Image (cartoon, rainbow, N blue to C red):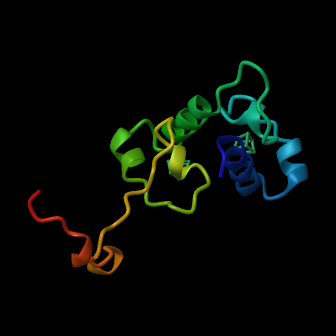
Amino acid sequence: MTQTKSIRAKCLDCSNTSDGVTGCQETECSLYLLRFGKRPSGCRPLKAIKEYCNWCTNDMKDERLECPVINCPLHSYRFGRKIIPVVECSAQSVPPINNDLLVVGT
Ligand code: SF4
Ligand code: SF4
């Protein structure tokens, strides 16, 4: 999900309906100007998300780091940048070695 779509989804979570988001009165909320899922000039979605997550975690960086709410639309962006999930390696995810392609010595 893009940054602006994540913000829109978060606002829909917060206000339940599209009309609720439109009528939001929380002008102090860092997501306020971005709540329609569009980016007005001068607005920085990642900065707004980071501020929101700071507010959500009471400015506790460790809580933001370990935020367990993985379904939150802002989760991937909570540090103010995109977080790429770590892919666990397992024996099944590693393709078998094809010995025919091994080059031994030259
Ligand atoms: S701008 Fe803030 S208060 Fe308003 S709907 Fe979005 S998250 Fe909720
Ligand atoms: S990602 Fe976590 S810290 Fe950020 S708004 Fe969602 S629940 Fe709060």
Q: Is residue 102 left or right of residue 78?
A: left
Q: Nearer the viewer, residue 82 or 12?
A: 82
Horizontal and vertical percent for residue 102?
20, 69
Q: Count the marks.
A: 0
Q: Nearer the viewer, residue 20 or 105?
A: 105
Residue in the image at 68% along x and 51% along y: 10
Residue in the image at 64% along x and 26% along y: 44
Residue in the image at 70% along x and 24% along y: 43
Q: Quadrant of residue 35?
A: top right
* Quarter of the displayed picture in which ligand 1 can be seen: top right
| Camera sees residue 97 | no
Horizontal and vertical percent for residue 56?
52, 44
Considering every residue shown, the one lying at the far top of the view is 42
Residue in the image at 53% along x and 35% along y: 50
Horizontal and vertical percent for residue 13?
71, 57
- In the image, residue 27 above or below residue 58: above
Considering every residue shown, the one lying at the far left of the view is 105
Q: Is residue 30 left or right of residue 89?
A: right
| Camera sees residue 80 | yes
- In the image, residue 94 above or below residue 15: below
Q: Quadrant of residue 99?
A: bottom left
Q: Is residue 15 left or right of residue 57?
A: right
Q: Quadrant location of the C terminus? A: bottom left
Horizontal and vertical percent for residue 73?
62, 54
Q: Is residue 81 left or right of residue 72?
A: left
